[in-house]
Image (cartoon, rainbow, N blue to C red):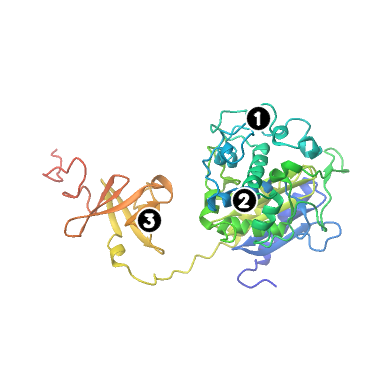
Amino acid sequence: MTAPLTALLPTTERALLHRIAAAQSEGRAPSLTGAVARDGQLVWTGERPFAEGDETGANTQYRIGSITKTFTAVLVMRLRDDGLIDLQDPLDKHLPGTGIGEVTIAQLLAHSAGLGAETPSPWWERSSASLRPGLPDVLGEQPRKHPVGRRFHYSNPGYTVLGSLVEAVRGASWEEVLQREILEPLALTRTSMDAQAPSAQGWAVHPWADVLLPEPAEDLGLMAPAGQLWSTATDLCRFGAFLAEGDDRVLSAASVREMRTPAVPAESGEWDTTYGFGLQIIRRDGRTLVGHGGSLPGFVAGLWVGVDDGVTAAVLANATSGPLPSLVATDLIQIVAEAEPRLPQTWRPLPEVDQELLEITGLWYWGTYAFGLQLLPDRVFALQPLTGPGRQARFTDAEDGTWIGQNGYYAGETLRVVRRTDGSIAHLDLGSFVFTREPYEPDTGIPGGVDKQGWRGLPS
């Protein structure tokens, strides 16, 4: 039974059920299942109709296709966090002999390595993996379709290469590493390489008649890191909660936040859609959502996370086409977020006062622009303009008396307190910009100096 503070209102549950019912009916899917988690807790599941032989629906496995790529990206980020690779390393440093060794690991993660979208013929999703036993068979004779690093171009072969990178660095199969480093720590017991009962049969639905054709479920072999996995709506919601908050057993909050950060420019005409490291990033109705869609013959899937709202939604269907799981999942997030907005975090005073930090807070001027500098928990400063949009950022303690910008214009820039000989604060230096307590305050080290006659009027 769901605890009162996590349970959804009956009206919200009805709206969620109506949305997936409409998706199953309009998309003509043999079955469609959805699940929603809020603040890491599963709060709703629904099915239309129940998958054959299953009593809960949300525990039924469906193939999740390219959502697998997000799992692969987590494994690569773990290599980085363990100090085994750098994301800017060329591929050749760790996986020589591919023929694309100059591309970086970051470019492969972000689909900006210029590689082709698919393998050479035949259609890899419907053909035996034995036809592609090695990376040359996956990449083909001309693997690059675009200049390296210049644009986003989605690439299934690129994530196959990343899976091989994981194997080369870890010295174990991609499947073994996945099981050990993600599935077991996060208790994703219903996520697997092959179907485990209860699982849905994949179907093609005739576009002009209500009849079905069973789809094959090929083992993808070397291509597995790009799309092999089977999972359930409940497992995916648990994985989505991890993508929102991180889990130190798998990947820190800072590293999953890095995955959620845009790494490539948006495609022309698609300014509300971009890509991070193994995650799609979209803007919808004022919300930023991260996640991934997936499809393989007989199945479509969507996993999306509204980090600011604390809501995750997963939608799975066993039809080659018709339903739009990613659209439905983002609708489920919107339904919950708008009907039952997230409660603000409880305000609490800091456990102790650091007078030296307190002295830095308050009003500061960059030229004539007014900014407020606020002290947050964990020795974090937040800088924001007092009027208009302006430049704002958070700064974390660098433990050497300076602070490093974490976002916005000042990301990576150093905030430094400059003191006079008597110890009083003269000004703040932020990436060479001087911030003073008064607009153009004299004798504070402003380059070019301040006119000695001071402020004046303009005679008419």
Q: Residue at x 78, y 58 (%)?
A: 60
Q: CA distance from mark 3 to mark 2?
A: 28 Å
Image coordinates for residue 190, horizontal then vertical, percent: 74, 59
Left or right of 120? Residue 433 is: left
Q: Residue at x 51, y 41 (%)?
A: 88
Q: Which mark is residue 235?
A: none
Image coordinates for residue 43, horizontal then vertical, percent: 66, 65
417, 367: nearer the viewer: 417
Q: In the rendered image of this protein, does residue 348 appear above or below residue 238?
A: below
Q: CA distance from mark 3 to mark 1?
A: 43 Å
Name the residue beneath numbered marker 3: 398
Which of the image's four quarters has the N terminus? Answer: bottom right
Whether tag 2 and tag 1 are in contact, CB under 8 A, the answer is: no
Mark 2 belongs to which amino acid? Answer: Leu
Numbered disc 3: secondary structure: loop
Q: Residues within 10 Å of mark 2 (few under 14, many from 20)?
A: many
Disc on the earlier residue, 3 or 1: 1
Disc on the earlier residue, 2 or 1: 2
Name the residue beneath numbered marker 2: 75
Disc on the earlier residue, 3 or 2: 2
Name the residue beneath numbered marker 1: 143
304, 338: nearer the viewer: 304
Numbered disc 2: secondary structure: helix
Left or right of 405? Residue 14 is: right
Which of the image's four quarters has the C terminus? Answer: top left
